[in-house]
Image (spheres, grey):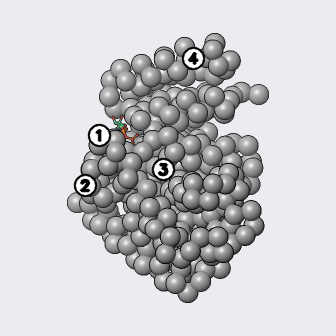
Amino acid sequence: MARKKLAMIGAGMIGGTLGHLSVLKGLGDVVLYDVVEGMPQGKALDLLESGPIEGFDASVTGTNDMADIKGADVCIVTAGLPRRPGMSRDDLLATNVKIMQSIAEGIRDNAPDSFVIVITNPLDAMVTTMKKVTGFAKNMVVGQAGVLDSSRYRTFVAMELGVSVESVSAIVLGGHGDDMVPVRSLCHVGGVPIDKLIPAARLEEIENRTRNGGGEIVGLLKTASAFYAPAAAAIRMAEAYLLDKKEILPCAALLEGEYGVDGFFVGVPVQIGAGGIEKIVEVDLTDSERKMFDESVSHVRELVDASEKLLSA
Ligand code: APR
């Protein structure tokens, strides 16, 4: 059986890490695509030369030609600018929406059967642009945000309690902005509800740290934004698709009535398997979580409206 093919669209900090994780996990052949000449080729060659040490035989190539992603089973998109200190994700909109439009055309023309995972920020608007321009079915276009945000929430809860991260289950829903919704009522540690273990005021601080998780890293790195955890999150989603795991993960998916939202990509739990997004899972939220979710969705709406104006300009 031929190996699967993964195309990383954007070979920067996240793109390179995506390639590395893919070969280490044996997911398939990797193509790194970027607009910068030489860089994707150099990273690909460096990765390839780790094969004898790590024991993988996957092909790893770098390119500046979209035609080389032909036949890709999965495309993971990070092309665009990252944040700098003081910037919100929304500040990236004008630049990244144009980049996303051209990338989406390239994917539509060269990898029409691929499962597309978008990471570029502002995520909710970028994944909407990807869906519109490709015209792909809604089950084949997904945004990565919730897996990362939930992982940050789990990390901070585990640190607070001194327990394994694997004992903490948590999800973060809504848009991938500062108003994302860490769902306190669904956060458990070894089956025990989180509000029985951490006082409300401290939980509030942990949830705010989660909301600002990306900004905290940008503030420390100064010239880059987070890349290890975002890449790990997208690879988890790609793995669920390629291995038909039917795993339920919080992702930005196009809602058509679920959660009372129609026509917008919003972070909700979805089942990912060989059919892409196979199901949207509706969870119960408390009244205050529901209110936060609705506020987050109205922000997504504003962002998408702004991106549509930029696209038609
Ligand atoms: N076509 C292809 N690649 C492009 C294009 C384009 N039109 N425009 C920019 N790129 C490439 C850049 O050359 C760069 O190598 O996208 C890459 C982005 O990589 P980084 O700048 O290292 O950014 P990264 O940290 O990987 O983040 C990428 O993901 O999480 C989001 O906010 C983040 O929007 C940012 C994206």
Residue that appears at 36% across and 54% down: 215
How far apart, in angstroms, are the residues tagged by discs 3 and 4? 27 Å
> Crowdedness of circle 3 by 10 Å Cα count: few (<14), some, many (20+)?
many
Amino acid type of the residue that numbered disc 1 sits on in the rendered structure: Thr
> Crowdedness of circle 4 by 10 Å Cα count: few (<14), some, many (20+)?
some
Amino acid type of the residue that numbered disc 4 sits on in the rendered structure: Ser
**Residue occupying the far bottom of the picture:** 287
Q: Are marks 4 and 1 in contact (CB under 8 Å)?
A: no
Q: Is residue 253 visible?
A: no
- Across and down, in percent, residue 51 comes to 61, 17
> Crowdedness of circle 1 by 10 Å Cα count: few (<14), some, many (20+)?
few
Amino acid type of the residue that numbered disc 3 sits on in the rendered structure: Val
Q: Is residue 214 visible?
A: yes
Which is nearer the N-term, disc 2 or disc 4?
4
Q: Name the one closer to the observer, 75 or 22.
A: 22
Residue that appears at 34% across and 41% down: 221
Q: Are marks 3 and 1 in contact (CB under 8 Å)?
A: no
Q: Are marks 3 and 4 in contact (CB under 8 Å)?
A: no
Quadrant of the drawing holding the C terminus = bottom left
Which is nearer the N-term, disc 3 or disc 4?
4
* Camera-nearest label, 3 or 4: 4
The residue singled out by tag 1 in the image is 223
Mark number, residue 86 = 2
How far apart, in angstroms, are the residues tagged by discs 2 and 1? 11 Å
Which is nearer the N-term, disc 4 or disc 1?
4
Which is nearer the N-term, disc 3 or disc 2?
2
